[in-house]
Image (cartoon, grey):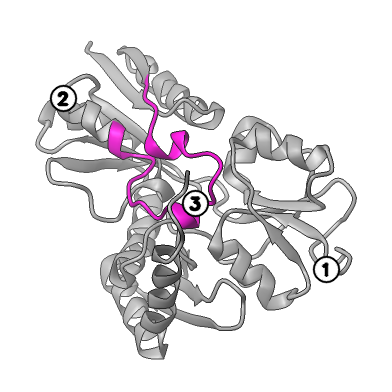
Amino acid sequence: MALLRIGSRGSQLALWQANHISTLLRERGHEVEIEIIKTTGDKITDVALAKVGTKGMFTKEIEEALADGRVDLAVHSLKDLPTELPPGFELVAVTTRVNPRDVFLSVKYESVNALPQGARVGTSSLRRQAQLKTVRRDLAIHSLRGNVDTRVRKLEEGEYDAIILAAAGLTRLGKTQWVREVLSESFMCPAAGQGALGIEIRKGDVAMREHLTFLNDSAARAATTCERALLNKLGGGCQVPIGAFAEMDGGALRLTAIVARPDGSEVLREQQSGSDPVALGESVGDALLRQGATRILEDVYRAAVALPPQP
């Protein structure tokens, strides 16, 4: 069988993901190598993601290696992959999805509601910050960057009273010891594509497509296609305060989505059902735009542009 070279970021979670795909490919008789590629997002570790604002900040360098032929496929956290791929690439598979929800972690406190007034909560996600502020305006939200181990260690050392992370990454790495509460999508709408892996190849690479299509999960593909269509309609990337969660409900897809101001002062919500993932995502996006999503997102982008250059 073929030698398949996987391009991956070097974080513990990214390597778990790459090795997971590698195992599945080896079971099919392939020889597999993993090449670690440092991305822009990996190089900028001391600035909140929302203040960087670069689409493809976790994928661009990997795509360059793919285009150059140094790797044959890329394994991404789907939520990091821009909704519109650059010319020359295609999303060949979306893997079976694990829990897409966010979770509340704390050493001392059992839930968001149990946090004392003014508690320090760590997250670099405007989406998470906005939804927390909607119900707990008193909380002090502080930037939290780094890999999963680093974030959990900062919690254990008392730098934060609580942190919010994706359930999927913690589950994959077996780092669930401080998970106190799984946050429902009605309270904390997840990021589009969260919990799924996206497998990217060079567009038109028929042989690679044939090797990899077995990795595609049709249910995960439909749900995440719907969420990404919503995100694309709103013109948002993974660092803006947009949440999207699609799941099957009685034979149809149901999409729940939010657009929020980072301070929690305004949250727009919409939920619809349908059979066509792209049409449903675009319909929900249109509804949010009619509610005023453009105004919120323009303000967020304007605030990001107004930030002074980082040293």
Determine which residue is flagged by label 3.
49
Q: Estimate the x, y position of residue 156 in percent, counting from the top left.
A: 82, 38
In percent of the image, x 63 and y 31: which residue is there? 173
In percent of the image, x 46 and y 61: which residue is there? 307
Q: Does the magenta stretch include residue 49?
A: yes
Front one among 292 and 280: 292
Q: Estimate the x, y position of residue 203 in percent, counting from the top left.
A: 13, 38
First reached walking from the N terminus: tag 3 or tag 1: 3
Element at label 3: helix
Front one among 2 and 214: 2
| Front position among marks 2 and 1 | 2
Determine the CA span between mark 2 and mark 1. 50 Å
Q: Is residue 32 above or below residue 266?
A: above
State the image quarter where residue 230 is shown. bottom left
Determine the CA span between mark 3 and mark 1. 26 Å
In percent of the image, x 38 and y 76: which residue is there? 298
Q: Is residue 57 above or below residue 205?
A: below
Question: What amino acid is labelled 1 in the image?
Answer: Asn
- Label at residue 224: none
Determine which residue is flagged by label 1.
113
Element at label 1: loop
Question: What amino acid is labelled 2 in the image?
Answer: Asp
- Label at residue 68: 2
Circle 1 packing at 10 Å, graded few (<14), some (14-19), many (20+), is few
Left or right: residue 133 compared with residue 88: right
